[in-house]
């Protein structure tokens, strides 16, 4: 189920930019132009996270936080200009969870969003050893075998395989896979993702030209097959 993000900013260009980007990241986005609209939107959309500007007409971000925290508990990330950084600190004291300073990179914002969501919603326990067919991956030891034979993977290849195997049947866009690796410290990956997938297939697929594990979803990205 996609998470819902409430974007609160008085500038329509900012709302549009964030809505387009976050929608591409598979979030539901609800826009609001000021704190008063945001209170109404929060009551009706029950957001999982709120991106909040501070300086807005009618009701600013501070007053929104004061009122919202009386009835809602969704995490809040403040978006602020550098000269208003002290205001962001005040926002944290009022109940915000984090802040980012304009101008920011979209990937940085996306990483902050995921980090905050992870903090407030502990990840469910998942199996440490994954098996599909003759392929086995152990997350604890970083050990991969095919037909019980060890396979040497690079760190990027291991992280890609672990991500895909952890959610069999789920389609991951190239942007999602690249962003996940970006958080792990690998930069500039989206343009080379196809190469890493090709190398990974050459190591784990019985016939890399006709993969049975890592499937291509044309025009979207990749998924790991569901076990029959």
Image (cartoon, rainbow, N blue to C red):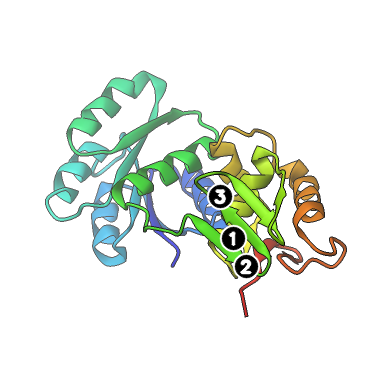
Which of the labelled discs sits on residue 132, or is there none? 2
> Which residue shows up at 16% across the image and 48% down it?
69
Which of the labelled discs sits on residue 227, or is there none? none
For residue 70, side relative to residue 142 (left or right): left
For residue 50, side relative to residue 105 (left or right): left
Q: Position of residue 144 (x, y in %)?
A: 64, 51
Q: Circle 3 is placed at which residue position? A: 21
Disc 1 is placed on an element classified as helix
Residues tagged 2 and 1 counted as in contact (Cβ below 8 A): yes
Q: Position of residue 67 (x, y in %)?
A: 15, 48
Q: Circle 1 is placed at which residue position? A: 165
Q: Position of residue 117 (x, y in %)?
A: 36, 49
Neighbour tally class for label 3: few under 14, some 14-19, many 20 plus, Cα within 10 Å: some
**Mark 3 or 2 closer to N-term?**
3
**Mark 1 or 3 closer to N-term?**
3
Q: Is residue 78 at least partly visible in the picture?
A: yes
| Front residue (pair 76, 39) | 76
Neighbour tally class for label 2: few under 14, some 14-19, many 20 plus, Cα within 10 Å: some
**Mark 2 or 1 closer to N-term?**
2
Q: Is residue 149 above or below residue 109?
A: below
Number of labels in the image equals: 3
């Amino acid at each position: 189920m996609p998470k819902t993000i409430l974007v609160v900013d008085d500038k329509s260009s900012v709302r549009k930019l964030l809505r387009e980007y976050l929608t591409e990241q598979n979030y539901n986005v609800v826009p609001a132009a000021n704190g008063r609209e945001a209170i109404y939107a929060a009551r009706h959309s029950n957001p999982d996270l709120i991106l909040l500007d501070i300086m807005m007409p009618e009701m600013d971000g501070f007053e929104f936080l004061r009122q919202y925290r009386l009835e809602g508990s969704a995490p809040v990330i403040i978006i602020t200009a550098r000269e208003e950084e002290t205001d962001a600190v005040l926002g944290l004291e009022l109940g915000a969870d984090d802040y980012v300073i304009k101008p920011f990179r979209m990937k940085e914002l996306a990483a902050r969003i995921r980090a905050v969501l992870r903090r407030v919603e502990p990840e469910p326990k998942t199996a440490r050893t994954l098996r599909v067919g003759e392929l086995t991956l152990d997350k604890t030891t970083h050990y991969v075998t095919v037909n019980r034979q060890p396979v040497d993977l690079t760190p990027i290849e291991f992280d890609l395989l672990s991500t895909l195997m952890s959610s069999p049947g789920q389609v991951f866009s190239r942007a999602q896979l690249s962003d996940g690796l970006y958080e792990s410290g690998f930069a500039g990956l989206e343009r080379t993702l196809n190469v890493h997938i090709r190398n990974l297939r050459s190591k784990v697929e019985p016939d890399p030209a006709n993969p049975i594990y890592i499937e291509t979803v044309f025009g979207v990205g990749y998924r790991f097959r569901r076990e029959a």
